[in-house]
Image: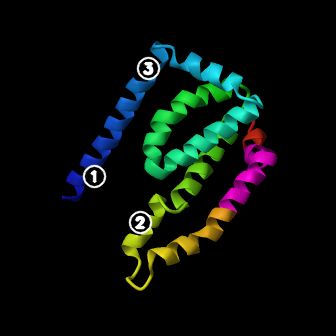
């Protein structure tokens, strides 16, 4: 039974991956990437403005979508454009990962909160969970801000590895 359910979940993840890859190919074939480039270039602030918009969109999508869908659908659309604008791929990946984790903890839609609600005793209310997670969200937002202003924190170790 365990092997069957694992195979079923793995199959669903791979179907999402295949669908996302097909979507990305069709999106690029119909000129979607050029539209994204034009949109990002038209934003005030250049690469900084584009990165802020992408982070905000990913944060909001984290309320309603799981990380798999965001990673397989949104990142292939905006990632290459942001990388072409000169962002470090390691820094961008870490920022997206922390942003998604923060989104999953943010009330009222945070997926992680609903998982916690499912295992918490009946004496712990949803309000308790929401209030209890706020310091962790604040810490993650502070961490994102720190990484935003000091990107060397993320890239120092990879920079030490010889090519």
Which residue corresponds to the image point at 63% horizontal and 67% vertical from the top-left?
136
Q: Position of residue 8 (x, y in %)?
A: 24, 47
Give the percent coordinates (x, y) of residue 104: 51, 56
| Crowd around label 3: few <14 · some 14–19 · many ≥20 (10 Å) | some
Give the position of the C terminus as an image quadrant.
Answer: top right
**Residue 159 sits in which quadrant?**
top right
The magenta stretch spans which residues?
Answer: 139-157
User: SS of the residue at dot 3?
Assistant: helix
Question: Relative to 51, is 75 on the left or the right?
Answer: left
C-alpha separation, residue under disc 1 versus residue under disc 2: 19 Å
From the image, state whether disc 1 or disc 2 is nearer to you.
2
Q: Would you say the residues marked 1 and 2 are in contact, meaning their CB atoms lie under 8 Å apart?
A: no
Is 31 contained in the magenta span? no
Q: Mark 3 points at which residue?
A: 25
- As measured in the structure, the alpha-carbon distance from the residue carrying label 3 to the one carrying label 1 is 29 Å
User: Pointer 2: what residue?
Assistant: 115
Sequence-wise first label, 2 or 3:
3
Q: Name the residue under label 1.
A: 6
């Amino acid at each position: 039974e365990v092997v069957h359910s694992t195979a079923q979940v793995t199959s669903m993840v791979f179907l999402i991956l295949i669908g996302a890859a097909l979507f990305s190919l069709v999106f690029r074939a119909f000129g979607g990437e050029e539209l994204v480039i034009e949109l990002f270039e038209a934003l005030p602030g250049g690469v900084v403005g584009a990165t802020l918009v992408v982070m905000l969109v990913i944060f909001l999508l984290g309320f309603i979508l799981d990380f798999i869908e965001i990673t397989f659908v949104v990142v292939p659309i905006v990632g290459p454009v942001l990388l072409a604008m000169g962002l470090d791929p390691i820094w961008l990946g870490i920022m997206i990962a922390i942003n998604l984790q923060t989104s999953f903890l943010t009330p009222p839609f945070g997926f992680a909160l609903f998982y916690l609600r499912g295992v918490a005793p009946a004496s712990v209310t949803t309000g308790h969970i929401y209030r209890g997670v706020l310091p962790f969200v604040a810490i993650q937002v502070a961490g994102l801000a720190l990484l935003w202003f000091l990107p060397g924190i993320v890239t120092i170790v990879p920079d030490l590895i010889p090519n």
